[in-house]
Amino acid sequence: MNAPGFGLLLLQTLLVAAGMLLADAPVPWLVAFTTLFAGISAWRVRALLGDAEEDRDVELTRMQGDLRESSEALERERAELSVLMSSISEAILAVDESGKILFFNDRFRAFFGAVGLTERKTTLREVFRASEVADVFQQAQRELNPRHSEVDLSVAGESQPRTFDLAVTPLRSLQGAVYGCVGVFHDVTELKRAERMRIDFVANVSHELRSPLTAIKGYSDTLRSDFEAGRMEDIPGFVDVISRNADRLMALIGDLLDLSSIESGGEIHRQWVMSGELSQRVLRQLEPRRAQRNMNAHVEVEPGAERIYADPGRLEQVLVNLVDNAFKYTQEGGRVRVAWEKGPGGGVRLRVADNGPGIPEESRARIFERFYRVDKARSREVGGTGLGLSIVKHIVQRHGGSVELRSTPGQGTEFLCDFPGPEGT
Ligand code: ADP
């Protein structure tokens, strides 16, 4: 009860009591006091009830606040989860116990969404025609344990399948009942490719090392037995073979060390290098090879390309490999042209062209691979390691540039290396 209400009641009671008093009647006195007492008690009860109501209001307001906070926290968590799910590089899919999709992330849609995905409608078997994915989900659900499997799956917009490491875990409610499974598709295609390349590389290196070593071992054994038997006439020839194979081993090991130092991120120290001077130095270095094959070589430097911002040692390696190849694979008496031009974006372009046999179309995509050769026998014969172009590509790329090959079979080959300028690096 509020204060005016209480005042009115008191006034009422006092008026009744006063009336009674004036009437000098004892019974009405009692009535008046009873009324006054009852009025005060009623006011006290009302006041108490009012307190409880107020308490309840406060409690309700507090609960409303709590509820709002929880729902805001829930909303925030949901938003965070959604950002997390869409930024994750793995594809994620959850299905219920009947195989119907519960949810999936953006990456899953990008990989496998070609069929059109609808939550609670599309089934696992509609997305993946091959049964192996559904089988992994089923196993995890049946055995109530996470399952792992490697699966090759077609993905949208790619002709080759990708390899995924699929991890499926059962989904449990708070009460512990399993109501579906969540699968994480981790794309391991690149990892597998790198692993395969590493295995191939080790196999190739062993193979490349074995041939010269076998020759050295074989010829040195024969040399010894001939020497012990006093047969001297073949000895110079044997020593020659041993020496050539030792050179081959050294070239191979030198190239392998170069490649590994470039690939493992060995420092590139850029500075201004005079392109003309460098070219002449390389030609002098390769003079024996040029003379041996009676080649014709010349250098051209376009205005603006007199100097190039690169690591001098590495740039020399690029030029040696390209010019040496041109000398090695072009027919005797052929022509080789080294040209320096202004390149795109303020950089410098190096061209090394020959009028040799060219590189067949089908080999061009693989020519920069380690140990790839168009003609293995020819490469071995001229002392090739199969690593030269791979080294060239890596060096140019470490400079932030790119390499291109242009070739017309029967007419010649041209390698173009674009090096960025100082501000483009
Ligand atoms: P190699 O040590 O065998 O020369 P490279 O990596 O330098 O290895 O070259 C790979 C292959 O590319 C060579 O074996 C050769 O078949 C081919 N090749 C490279 N340069 C030329 C060229 N200028 N003309 C024709 N073929 C070439």
Image (cartoon, grey):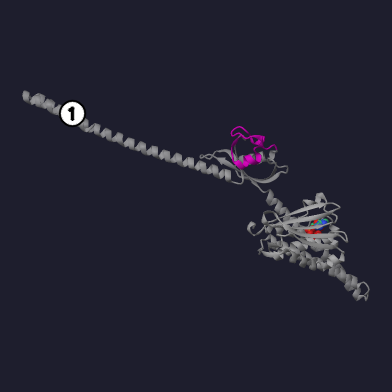
| Ligand 1 positioned in quadrant | bottom right
Is 117 inside the magenta-drawn segment? yes
Query: Residue 128's image quarter?
Result: top right
Q: Is residue 127 visible?
A: yes
**Residue 277 placement (x, y as % from top left):** 74, 66
- For residue 195, above or below residue 115: below
Task: Residue at 24%, 33% (x, y): give it.
Answer: 47
Question: Left or right: where does residue 138 sit relative to residue 376?
Answer: left
- For residue 119, above or below residue 160: above
Query: Mark 1 is on which residue type?
Result: Leu
Which of these two is toward me, 416 or 267? 416
Is 271 inside the magenta-drawn segment? no
Question: Left or right: where does residue 145 sit relative to residue 244?
Answer: left
Question: Left or right: where does residue 32 sit relative to residue 316?
Answer: left
State which quarter of the image contains the N terminus: top left
Q: Residue furthest front?
A: 303
Which of these two is toward me, 102 or 11? 11
Instruction: Give the mark count.
Output: 1
The residue that label 1 is drawn on is: 8
Query: Residue 146's image quarter?
Result: top right
Q: Is residue 207 visible?
A: no
The magenta-colored residue range is: 100-129
**Beta carbon of the mark 1 residue lies under 8 A of ligand 1:** no
**Residue 234 placement (x, y as % from top left):** 92, 72
The secondary structure type at the circle numbered 1 is helix
Query: Residue 357's image quarter?
Result: bottom right
**Residue 373 placement (x, y as % from top left):** 81, 56
Which of these two is toward me, 20 or 65? 65
